[in-house]
Amino acid sequence: MSFFDQPGRLTRFKVVHAVWRRQRMEVLPGVAPVSLVLARTEATVVGVTDVRGYPNGFVFLLRLRWGLVADPAEEVPWPFPHWGSPDPLDGDLFPDELLRFGVQFADGRKVTNMDRYPFVPEDLPPDQPVLIEAGVGGEGGRLGRGASWDLELAVQPLPPPGPLAFVCAWPGRGIPESRVEIDAGLILDAAAAAVPFFAAEAGS
Amino acid sequence: MSPMKRAWPCPNVVPGMAPVAVILARTEETVVAVTGIRADPAGFGFTVNLRLRNLRPSERRGFWPFPEFGHHQGRLLPDAGILRLTIEFADGRSVNNLHAPTERSNAPDAERPMLSSGPGTGMEATGPFRDRWIWDMDYRVRPLPPPGPLAFICVWPGRGIPTSRVEVDGAAIREAANDAVTLWLDDPYCSEDC
């Protein structure tokens, strides 16, 4: 069984709302000393940096790098799915050109970008993690002979203590399922260090 | 190679992280914070987090305190409205966002650190937060600081913030730079031969 088995079609769903936006407005996060190369081939790198802990989750920067784009006129498409509806693939397979990315908590709970946030199964348990595009969009594109995209992502809730895995696979770029684990305590410590920007808003 | 021809921060590096998150200045209505720090052998990057509240609608329209971008909406920024940011190394070298040699300078001066900014990310404040102004601006400094205290200094008269200073450990940033990973020996991101 693959980490990235495609979820079944959503027939009964609900829309979940991230607390991330409000936390970003109100809370100065703690920063975790995390810098990872999650996968690397001759022509592609997937990295993770800028991990910040909030009271109800964590945020990080996913760094995607192309070492060579053969066609100088080729635009590099955005490699992350945009879920504009609960069933955009209409039963088709998740395209190999898209990066598969996810995180897994020490207790086995996991979330991937093949899930269709904000559309989730109607019976999704409240403690099930969700993966959210946290930024206003990716930064990057073609540059020189290569290309890059940076994407800010958020996961809520916080992970439990123990190993926290970042996992990716990218068939279209020759990257098999790749997994790097960190100590979730780094993120929990960062979250514990988070403080409200305005003291009067503590606990609001 | 001229600094003009190099993308920076260089996409060819996954930076090391020196965890920093500090409030640089705070009033009842304004917070200036610094988070990061992303370090690589060429320098370091950080984010200035601005959180303003209790703004009148007229204040929110066209609000822009970053002088390094010069004009905004066709107007020069008034001095009092400017957020002045200075980075000071332990050996006394400093750079600020009013008179910064940037990566667009033709001849980098070894005696003066270089500072550049952007991109930045704002959030539309709506609902109960519609009196807010929120912006996270990325900055980059070259070269790496020497060991010793690295100071972030700001002053923002228009928001009632006097000269405010916080220091972080320059040695920790240098250690984080050692953790940075260069991706390809033949940097594919240089826009010209290098």
Image (cartoon, coloured by chain):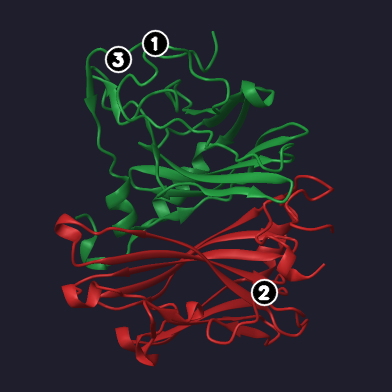
Residue drawn where x is 43% and y is 48% of the image: A53
Residue beneath disc 2: B104
Residue drawn where x is 63% and y is 23% of the image: A172
* Residue B74: percent from left, percent from top: 38, 81
Q: Chain of mark 1?
A: A
Q: How many residues crowd mark 2 within 10 Å: few (<14), some (14–19), many (20+)?
A: some
* Residue A48: percent from left, percent from top: 58, 42
In-front residue for pair A192/B155: B155
Residue beneath disc 1: A91
* Residue B13: percent from left, percent from top: 71, 51
Q: How many residues crowd mark 3 within 10 Å: few (<14), some (14–19), many (20+)?
A: some
Q: Chain of mark 2?
A: B
Q: Quadrant of residue B32?
A: bottom left
Instruction: Please state, as top left, top right, bottom left or bottom right, where the C terminus of chain A lies in the image.
Output: bottom left
Residue drawn where x is 50% and y is 44% of the image: A151
What is the secondary structure assignment of the residue under circle 1? loop
Q: Quadrant of residue A28?
A: bottom left
Name above or below for residue B129 compared with residue B67.
above
The answer to whether one can see residue B160 in this image is no
* Chain appearing in red on the rendered image: B
Q: Quadrant of residue A129?
A: top left
Distance from disc 3 to disc 2, alpha carbons, whole Å, reads: 51 Å
Q: Do the residues at discs 3 and 2 belong to one chain?
A: no
Residue beneath disc 3: A10
Q: Which mark is residue B29?
A: none
* Chain appearing in green on the rendered image: A
* Residue B140: percent from left, percent from top: 60, 68
Distance from disc 1 to disc 2, alpha carbons, whole Å, reads: 50 Å
